[in-house]
Image (tube, coloured by chain):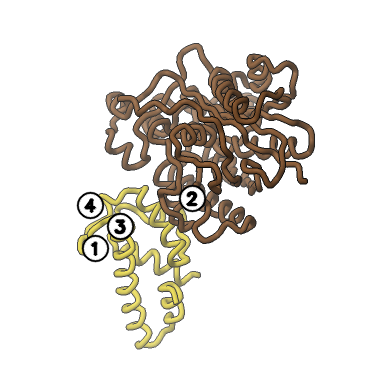
Chain colours: A brown, B yellow
Amino acid sequence: MTRAAVLCGVGGALPTIAVSNEELASRFDTSDQWIRTRTGIGNRHVIEPGRATSDLAVEAATEALAVAGRTAGPAPVDLVVLATSTPDRPCPATAPVVAHRLGLGTVPAFDVAAVCTGFLYALATAVSMVTAGLADRALVIGADTFSTILDPADRTTAAIFGDGAGAVVLRAGEADEPGALLGFDLGADGAGEDLITVRAGGSRQRASGEAAAEGDQWFAMQGGPVFTEAVLRMSESSRTLLERLGWTGGEPAKVVAHQANIRILRAVGEQLGLDEKQFVVNLDRVGNTVAGSIPLALRDAVADGDLASGQRVLLTAFGGGLTWGSAALVWPDLGRPAPTPPELP
Amino acid sequence: MTTAQRISTSHTTDKESVMTVSIAQESLKHRLAALIGEKFGLDEAELLSGATFDELEIDSLILVELGLILRKEMDIILAEGELKSSFTLDEAVDVIRAKAEQA
């Protein structure tokens, strides 16, 4: 018997404010057709005034814990790992207040920062801790509110990014059970730190003694090179993991990739020789929710019946850092969260 | 044999090879037109007409995607921005051929 971490719950949360392409077209020189053809995104959500990342994290976690309770029975959560690049405060981490508000007592709780790869890094961390016996039931959350760091004058990032959170629950189990995390491939390359960044607000700018340069307080991304790196890194990482697991010849059944852009997902499919139908997609409704992206896509896929127990599932992501990673599991039989609402008008 | 290899092995200096290069140039151009046509649903004849990518509504995002396809199909690695939307197909072929010869 080999101890493993087994996925037993998924949940998600979105702010109530939806922003359609038409609304963006009324603010910027853009159009629904321009945004859809270049990104596949039709709608995204923006955090309500007065709320923050932890509020979405708590909501997503609450749903995931309810699903886990129905799937695996009640058991105390003894670890919280939260992936975010938009914490409630620069200091301290957001995970402790999330654990507190969930009524989890004084369990260990900390943040992981790997931008859009954050959830997979957090998942790898929690899986390692469960496998090592440091925890028996872990809550892993990805939550971001990028609307709070986007340049208000930038139509491109306004179209791509949305706020949102997703969460999964892991329980200690056996390696041969459905839901056991079977392997990871993770990587990073800091030579690309300028490609996806907020330049000001950290120690580099603060210790310079200079005020932040105009615009440096906002998130900035170099679209072309990011597209290329995202496709190549996710493809290579996926290939590495699939080969290690012997999942070749059209496997896996489903790929849940970071919901960056439909054209990035298609290009990854092209590189891996996988059909577009094998990719789970919810970016049309939510945009790129950064660390929330993969768990939110998992949650929506379960709610909509796009993921079935017994299917081989590959998770893959790419983000700022640069960072990238992949994970694999056989999908477990989960209690269903509520169906996702249809796309808002 | 990929087009890149065919071009690099044919790159010598006598008259015969000049002809080989120009045939390879034509063949690379047609191969590129076919690839762009197939992957992006564009008309090959229009691509071969001498219009710029801009005029054909091939934007910078499509050129990034084309870079990935060239890498996969022909082992040609282009740097960011080397293919410009102001290029005609012939100009793109020149850049790609120069890359293939370097390889």
Pick whichever of labels 1 and 4 is earlier in the sequence: 1
Callout 2: residue from which chain?
A: A
What is the spatial separation of the Cα atoms under label 2 and label 3, in whole angstroms?
24 Å
Tell which tag, 3 or 4, sits nearer the viewer.
4
- Residue A39: where, in percent of width, then height? 37, 40
What is the spatial separation of the Cα atoms under label 2 and label 1, in whole angstroms?
26 Å
Query: In this figure, which residue is indicated by the disc labeled 4?
Result: B55
- Residue B42: where, in percent of width, then height? 25, 57
| Residue A291 in the image: above or below residue A311 | above
Residue, x 56% and y 31% (percent of image)? A10
Query: In this figure, which residue is indicated by the disc labeled 1?
Result: B44
Let me know if marks 2 and 3 both belong to one chain: no
A193 on left or right of A125: left
Residue, x 43% and y 34% (percent of image)? A304
What is the spatial separation of the Cα atoms under label 2 and label 4, in whole angstroms?
27 Å
What is the spatial separation of the Cα atoms under label 3 and label 4, in whole angstroms?
10 Å
Query: In this figure, which residue is indicated by the disc labeled 2?
Result: A231
Callout 3: residue from which chain?
A: B
